Image (cartoon, grey):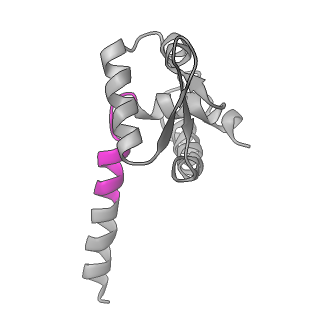
Amino acid sequence: MDPISNEEECMASVEEALQIFGGKWSFLVLRQLFKGPQRFNQLRRNLDHISTKSLTDILRHLEEHEIIRRQVFPTVPVTVEYSLTDKGKDFQTILVEMGNWARKWGKPRGIDLSEQRE
């Protein structure tokens, strides 16, 4: 494969990843789920500035791309829990590296992604 084709393929892959993870709240939702499975209201409380609609939309989007799993428990009322799939867990390393880059080059914001790493 020539270098230009390889570069184009790489950029296409990056664009695909950005379409999956590039939403405004995606990284923050994933950061919460790196801590372990959570219910919808737990996520909403932990992400206090996100609207219910936005959270619903991003959870559906991540589920459609098999980044998270939505599990429904047959309780009254119904309990729904969200967790990362193996595909979603693989993204944790990338988020940690992005955090490292941001600490080196970005403005300090008080969010440490490295403490979520197992």
Q: Is residue 90 above or below residue 57?
A: below
Query: Looking at the image, how many numbered discs can be counted on the residues?
Result: 0
Q: Position of residue 76 (x, y in %)?
A: 55, 12
Figure quadrant of residue 36: top right
Q: Quadrant of residue 53?
A: top left
Q: Quadrant of the C terminus?
A: top right
Residue 48 in the image: state x and y as whole percent: 47, 10
| Identity of the residue drawn at 38% across and 22% down | 55
Q: Is residue 87 above or below residue 63?
A: below
- Kindly report the secondary structure that dominates the magenta region of the rendered protein: helix
Task: Give the residue at the far bottom of this rendering.
Answer: 1
Nearest to the observer: residue 12 or residue 33: 33
Q: Residue at x 32, y 21 (%)?
A: 54
Residue 38: image location, x then y, percent:
59, 24
> Hey, which residue is sitting farthest right in the picture?
118
- The answer to which of 95 and 102 lies nearer the viewer is 95
Magenta range: 14-25
Q: Quadrant of residue 114?
A: top right
Decide whether residue 22 is among the magenta residues: yes
In this orientation, does residue 12 appear? yes
Residue 111 can be seen, yes or no: no
Q: Is residue 34 left or right of residue 48?
A: right
Q: Position of residue 75 (x, y in %)?
A: 58, 18
- In the visual, does 2 lie left or right of 80? left
- Measured along the vertical axis of the image, is residue 26 above or below residue 11? above
| Along the viewing direction, whichever of 47 and 37 lies nearer the viewer | 37
- Image point 57% across, 27% down: which residue? 32
Quadrant in the picture for the N terminus: bottom left
